[in-house]
Each structure stands twice: as C-alpha cells, then as structure tokens.
Amino acid sequence: MEEKKVEKFNVRVYGLALSSDNKVLLTDEFRLGMLMTKFPGGGLEPGEGTIDCLRRECREELGSEIEIIRHYYTTDFFQITRLVDPPQQLISIYYLIRIIDNSAFKTTTRRFDFMPLDGAQAFRWVPLQALSIDELSFPIDKKVGGMLKAEFF
C-alpha cells in the first residue's frame, strides 16, 4: 500500500516519570474509539514551547506541576499518525520528569481500569522490569520504552 503524502507535522510532547523504585508512569486512555497505552503528555499548541506544553499537559492530566530533569528523546525516524485525517508526520519529544505531587492523581494497578467512554483515562505505575514493550500502543513509545528499560533496568 502506498503511503499518502503528508503535508503537516503533528508535534507531541511526553513526560517520562520514574519512581525511586524503578517504576514508570503510564496512562491508559480511550480516545477516538480506541484503547491506548502511552506516556503522559499531548499535543503542542501554536505559540507554545515544548516544555510549556508538557507542563500544561501534566497540570491538565495529573493535576500537578512537574520538574523537567532533562530531554530524553526526539523522534529520529519517519512516522505517520493516522489518528488525524489527513495523516500527518508525527514528531514526539520526551523529557524525563519528576512529578511534584504524586498524590494529586489516582493510580490503579489494572490496565484500562475505566468505562470505555471517549476521554476516559487511568494512570498506572509499572515496574520497568515488568514493562512489556508490546503493551505500549504506538511505535515511538515502544522505542522509548525499550530505551528506558535498557538504561534504567
């Protein structure tokens, strides 16, 4: 199948929160009619810097401020997102972060621990040792999950 020509970029910014006992924070979501597991974060808005975007997304999703530890990874291969029409080239930027207030959001131990309604979301701390790369829904997240396992476990 021939790929459609892409004419726009879709820039996403994600936070990689690691706990002191080597767990990573994941978010399970139901959006656009599909279940997905990914890292917390979201889309860059016009006029916004990447760190400002991540801070905003964490305030919205986690209800907490964050500390940026360092840049971790930016997509270095061509990836199309088909979650928008027409398809766009996806660029994802990841930062290692520290969440200032872990008590600001609820977590669960069960995957997709919600009713499948659009916008549903649940957070889980997953031990890096137990993280299955196949559990992550998107190709760039899979790459980053593998990098985290290699570096921190």
Image: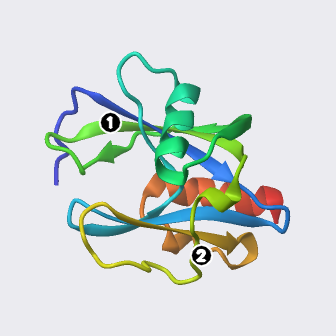
Residue at the location (54% across, 26% down)? Answer: 52
Residue at the location (20% across, 66% down)? Answer: 33
Q: CA distance from mark 1 to mark 2?
A: 26 Å
Classify 52 as above or below 99.
above
The percent position of residue 104, horizontal first and vertical second, equals 61, 57
Residue for badge 2: 132
> Which secondary structure, mark 2?
loop
Residue for badge 1: 89
Task: Inspect this view and state whether residue 74 appears.
Answer: yes
> Which secondary structure, mark 1?
strand
Q: Nearer the viewer, residue 19 or 56?
A: 56
Q: Nearer the viewer, residue 31 or 134?
A: 31
Classify 42 as above or below 30.
above
Residue at the location (50% across, 73% down)? Answer: 134
The percent position of residue 58, horizontal first and vertical second, equals 54, 44
Classify 54 as above or below 124.
above
Q: Nearer the viewer, residue 10 or 33?
A: 33
Task: Inspect this view and state whether residue 146 appears.
Answer: no
The percent position of residue 36, horizontal first and vertical second, equals 38, 66
The N terminus sits in image quarter = bottom left
Q: Is residue 153 left or right of residue 54?
A: right
